[in-house]
Amino acid sequence: MKLKTKRKMSIWRYLTLGYLVVILSGSILLVLPFATRDGETTSYINALFTSTSAACVTGLVPFDTFTHWSLFGQIVILALIQLGGLGFTTFVSILFIMLKRGFGLYERSAVVRSLGSNNLQGVRTLVKRIVIGTLIFELLGAGLLSIRFIPDCGSVAKGLYFSVFHAVSAFCNAGFDLMGEAGSLSAYASDPLVVITVSALIFIGGLGFCVWGDIFNCKANPKKFQFYTKFILICSVALLLISMGLFLAFDYNTGYADKGWGGKILCALFDATTARTAGFYTVDYNKLSESGYLLTVVLMFIGGCSGSTAGGIKVGTFAVMIMGMMAALRGKQDINLGKRRVDMSQLHQALAVFTAYLSIILVAVMTICAIEEFSFHQVLFETVSALGTVGLSLGITPHLSVVSRIILILLMFAGRVGVLTIAMALGRKNKSEAKIKRPVEMIFIG
């Protein structure tokens, strides 16, 4: 007689279902009558859309956040943003710590997988650092923003509330704002305090929790950083500076035409930062040049870093693909980086992620274009923004049909949880590969 053993769900299913529970819970709260300013019940599809956008830290909205939602609704959205930014497993870990419950192997595996780490040791310390670090950065950001928002809002309470909301939204790379008809942060396009503070919060939030941990362990000494930390910092800074220069060149006389020299630099800096995953904006993206539009789409597709609040295929994935291409063009078998070598299995994984994201975008764009009357130009922007959990929009989201909104909901969910995570959650456990390998054949490429 065989004894039945209790099987735990896979880590991947645990992470996927965790975000699903958070989204559904948020949608139930947002559908309540007192969640809106006028006391009217929001349709469930719009409540679900907003909850998904907040929990997946995207920023696409069917309604203006400030004018449609009441204080209760805004606080629900803010809580979803914070929960989605830190990650479902991080909050579960906080509960474990508060209840003084130990971390088993299963719990530790779930946490490190969600945070982009491989080290199963010191999970409790890692979670505490993430929470403390997040609070410190968000409070510092809120303090700096309050210098501008308190005078502009006319009261200390409202100014502090606006400062906290936008600091959390920026650090979690969500892009939700309370500026109403003003259009995100357009009124502060030439304000160095607001632009630099929000840009810094977005950039830091998009680096990844493990990168913070390494910087803290090394006491900010670059010589002691791990290889991954150095690699990600170099790639992120390079991508920021290159894209900033390109924005300045492409839209100097178009999108930024009405700004002074200082304003143009600030707008280019902000666009280069926010396009990678945040969703705030200081200029109307409908007024950008065609080159600026394409650069924005590319940046949204790339996104931030692994294990962070950002979306997209990730900076590491993009960098490994570029290096793999350069190695192949030079006829080299290995991808060498200084005194290190990148394993070819990582290139295979990077190509899998890139192909999966590109395939999903193509299918989504073709489907929405078949349903809606909007141009390919507009649909592509909205679709990449949803899958990359960016939140930038050309203004068509409120006018999409129910089917198209459901497609964007699925894209935002896939972008936050991760395409590979969902694939592994849905797939069956693979059997071990046979030791005998099949004969090799050549296929002409290029």
Image (spheres, rainbow, N blue to C red):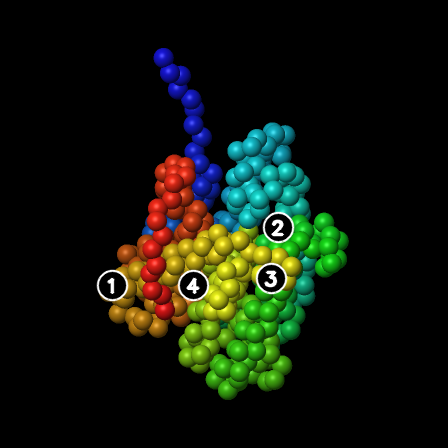
Looking at the image, is mark 3 or mark 4 nearer the viewer?
3
Residue at image mark 3: 337
Q: In this rendering, which labeled residue sits more in front, label 2 or label 3?
A: 3
Q: Which residue is mark 2?
A: 210
Real-space CA distance between mark 2 and mark 4, rounded to the nearest whole angstrom: 25 Å
User: How far, Cα to Cα, is label 1 from label 2?
Assistant: 42 Å
Q: Residues within 10 Å of mark 3 (few under 14, many from 20)?
A: few
The CA distance from mark 3 to mark 4 is: 32 Å
What whole-number distance in Å separates the C-alpha atoms at marks 1 and 4?
Answer: 19 Å
Q: Position of residue 431 (x, y in %)?
A: 38, 36
Find out whether the residues at labels 1 and 2 contact each other: C-beta distance under 8 Å: no
Give the mark nearer the N terminus: 1 vs 4: 1
Residue 276 seen by the camera: no
Most extreme residue toward the front, as rendered?
A: 439
**Height in image: 93 above or below 230?**
above
Q: Work out whether residue 55 or residue 1 is closer to the camera in this orientation and state it.
A: 1
Query: Which residue is label 1 attached to?
Result: 371
Name the residue tied to disc 4: 385
- Looking at numbered disc 4 in the image, what kind of residue is underneath it? Ser
